Amino acid sequence: MLSAKSLFQEILDNDESFRLFCSIAASGETQGGWENGRISALVPPEQHDLAPKIARHGADEDKHGRIFNALLKKRGLTPVPVPAETDYTMLLERSGIGLAHELLRDDKPLTEQDIVTYLAHSRVTEQRASDQMVMLVRYFGDHPDVGRAIRMISADEDNHLAYCHEELLRLAYAGHGRTIQRVLRECALAEIRVYRDVSLAVMDHMGRILRWPKAKSAALAAGIHGVYAYERAAGWRRMVSLTMPERRDALGGPATRAPEFA
C-alpha cells in the first residue's frame, strides 16, 4: 500500500535516494539562508526592527542546510548536484515569486513593498515547509538516525510561520492589507504549481533510483496531480489566511545552535 510513510522509508533505506533527498533539501535551505541574509542587510530604514529577525530566519535556514549535509556525512555519503527540475527555490524565483536574486545582489536598500512581498512569499513557503515537517515528525520523529534532526527543523519552521503571520498582520494594520492579500494569493497559486512540478520531478528521479514499477510511478504521479487539483480549487486558501500566533516574537533573539549536527 502506498503511503507517505512507506515512500519516505524507501528513500531513507537506500543510500542513493537518501543522498538525493538530503542534497535537494540542503541546497534549498542554503539558498533560503542566503536570500534572508541579503534581505536583512537591505531592510529599509522604516522597517529596521525586522532586520535581526530576518537574519535569524536566514541563520536557521543555513543551520538546516548543515544538518542535512551532516546526515549525509553520518552515512559516509557526499552531496550530489541538484537536478534543475527539482530546485524548488530557483523555480519559484523564475516564476516571479518573491524577491529576484538580481535585486538582492545589489546594495540598494529594499522598499517597504519589497518587505511585504518577501513576507508574503515566506508565509506561503513556510506553510509548505511546516506541513511537510509535521508529517515527517509524525512518522519518523523517533527514528534513531533522522528523528532528532527533523524535530529540530520542524520546530524552527513553526517559528518561521508564526513570525510571518505576526509581521504580516502588523503591516496589514499599518495599511498594507489589500496588497498583502493580493500578493499572498499570487504566491500561493504559483507555489502550488511549482510544488506539483517539483514533486513530479523528484518522484521521477526516485523511481529510477529505486526501480519502481511503472504502475507505482503512475499511481504516485496521479496522486500528485490530485493534490494539485484540490489545492488549485480550494486548498490554497490555507496558505493565505492570517492569524495572530500563540507564540509572539518567535524569531526574537539569536538562532539556536545544532552542535550535534553541524
Image: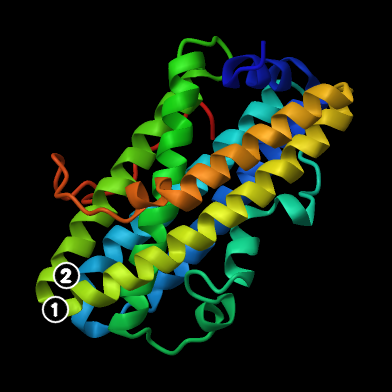
Residue 210, quarter of picture: top right
Question: Relative to the observer, which residue lies in front, 258 or 148?
Answer: 148
Answer with left or right where residue 258 lies relative to residue 67.
left
Question: Relative to the observer, which residue lies in front, 172 or 224?
Answer: 224
Name the element at disc 2. Answer: helix
The answer to whether the residue labelled 1 contacts the one labelled 2, judged by CB atoms less than 8 Å apart, is yes
Distance from Cα at disc 1 to Cα at disc 2: 5 Å
Residue 36, quarter of picture: bottom left
Residue 179: x, y in percent?
Answer: 28, 77
Answer with left or right where residue 103 lies relative to residue 77.
left
In the rendered image, the residue lying farthest to the bottom is 108
Q: Report whether residue 98 is seen.
A: yes
Residue 212, quarter of picture: top right
The residue to which callout 2 is attached is: 172
Quarter of the image with the C terminus is top right
The residue to which callout 1 is attached is: 175
- What kind of residue is marked 2? Ala
Q: Residues within 10 Å of mark 2 (few under 14, many from 20)?
A: some
- Colouring chosen for the image of the structure: rainbow
Residue 180: x, y in percent?
Answer: 28, 70
Q: Report whether residue 40 is seen.
A: no
Rendered residue at 26%/53% (across/down): 241
Name the element at disc 1. Answer: helix
Question: Relative to the observer, which residue lies in front, 80 or 177?
Answer: 177
- What kind of residue is marked 1? Gly
Residue 85: x, y in percent?
Answer: 76, 54
Rendered residue at 28%/59% (across/down): 53
Q: Check residue 125 in the rendering and tell me which mark sits there, or answer none.
A: none
Question: Relative to the observer, which residue lies in front, 138 or 30?
Answer: 138
Rendered residue at 82%/27% (across/down): 16
